[in-house]
Amino acid sequence: MSSRPSWPLTRAIHGAFTERRIYIRTGGKTRYLSIRPASQICAAVAIAALLGWTGFTTTAFVTSALDGHSARVQLETMSGAYEVRLAAYGARQRSLEEQLNQANQRRDEVTGRLSDKQARLVDTANNLQEAAAELAVLREEFVALVNARRDDAIRMRALESDLAGLRVALAGAETSKANLDGALEILSGAMGEVIAERDRAAGESTRLDGEVARLTGAIGRLEDRRERLLSQLEAAARTGLAGLETLFSRSNIDLDRILAQARRDYSGSGGPFVALAAADGTTTDGAGTEDTRVAALMADLETVNLMRFAAERLPFGAPVRGGRWTSGFGPRRDPNGRGRSMHHGLDIAAPRGTPVYATAGGIVTFAGRQRGYGIVVKIRHAFGFETFYAHNSRARVKVGQRVSRGDRIADVGSTGRSTGNHVHYEIRIDNEPVNPVKFIKAARDVL
């Protein structure tokens, strides 16, 4: 009995606080934000509490205003409490607004992902429909071919049956002279049909001979085109191979070791041996002239690809653009006057702050200060190569960072044991320093 009066109240609450949607249009798309009844009730309760507190404090303020000096003290106290409460409510409101913004962002992200998934689903459905249509066309063509083959078989069996009948009729004519005239007439009619069929077969044979001649000419043209393409590919492979061989020979790199490592680490092939089938059905091991040329071309192309792959990963080029070489690789007089010393790199002078670029892709193994060299950047490359950039004013990379050729890694400076702004550039192979000038000149002359 006590729960009945609450029904109208419950219905009134649900009627007043129904789920509402706020529509937002951004980027040509319309989205909405749903506000549940529970959230609306909480907001209404908070606003009512705020209004009640405001009324209470206002009443207290008016009442205390009539009490004189003590009333003013109480008023100031209550005013401070009121301001604290208002500040708390303002902070709470800002927190709720931030939560609402975060919820809107999450909703936008979910809506975006849902749109992407729907687009992919539509693409998949379209592809499926296209595949189904192609399958239906292929099935129709297959059925047509099967029907044509069945019709040809029926005609062949009919012709064989007619031929057998002719043979029976001929045997009957030989054994029965009385029926000779009738047998001759039957035989003549049947022979006429056979002759007509033979003539049609001869016409079809002539047409097929023409088709064979046309196909033979097309095959010849294709063979000529294949020969031209093969010659062009051989010339291109020889040109690329010669240029890359010059690049590696001028830099004094052990090309065989580089190619062996590249072939081992960055390529793969295999499978069972299957002999090539010749035109007459026999097999050959590829000893023919054309097969030999193709095999040699494939080997040259593989070598060119491996050499290009290696050249892209080796430090060909200068670390500074427009710099001036001041001290080369090898023995030299110490710049600080301490006698003869071994110089393991190349010094390139340039204004302070000039960009220093990575000469090949790799991973940064050191970026910081090193005694005598100032600010240093070290990069590890493929095939045991390492480059070294010293005396920089600033390092722009971190240890473990992967860089590509041409990326800015530092700025020219004069840190460490240095007499002026320059970059000290070294190339090391398996921790052994080599002359970087050969690599820079090889890249300049060949690439």
Image: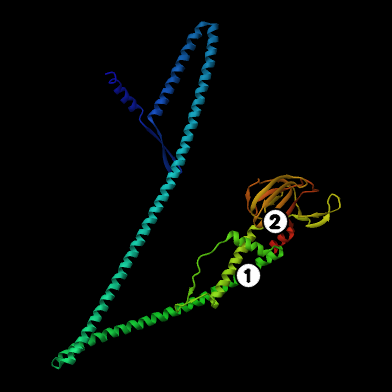
Residue position marked by numbered label 2 in the rendering: 430
Q: Is residue 343 above or below residue 144?
A: above
Q: From this viewpoint, which residue is outermost toward the left?
A: 178
| Horizontal and vertical percent position of residue 13 | 34, 25
> Which amino acid is tagged 1?
Thr
Q: Nearer the viewer, residue 365 or 29?
A: 365
Q: Nearer the viewer, residue 221 or 86?
A: 221
Asked if disc 2 and disc 1 are in contact, CB closer than 8 Å, the reply is no
| Horizontal and vertical percent position of residue 142 | 33, 67
> Which amino acid is tagged 2?
Asp
The residue at the point 51 percent across, 24 percent down is 90
Question: CA separation, marks 2 and 1?
Answer: 31 Å
Instruction: Please identify the quarter of the rendering in which residue 333 is found.
Output: bottom right
Q: Is residue 409 above or below residue 297?
A: above
For the N terminus, the image quarter is: top left
- Sequence-wise, the earlier of marks 2 and 1 is 1
| Horizontal and vertical percent position of residue 281 | 44, 77
Local secondary structure at mark 2: loop
Tell me if 84 is positioned left or right of 324 in this view. Answer: left
Residue position marked by numbered label 1 in the rendering: 239
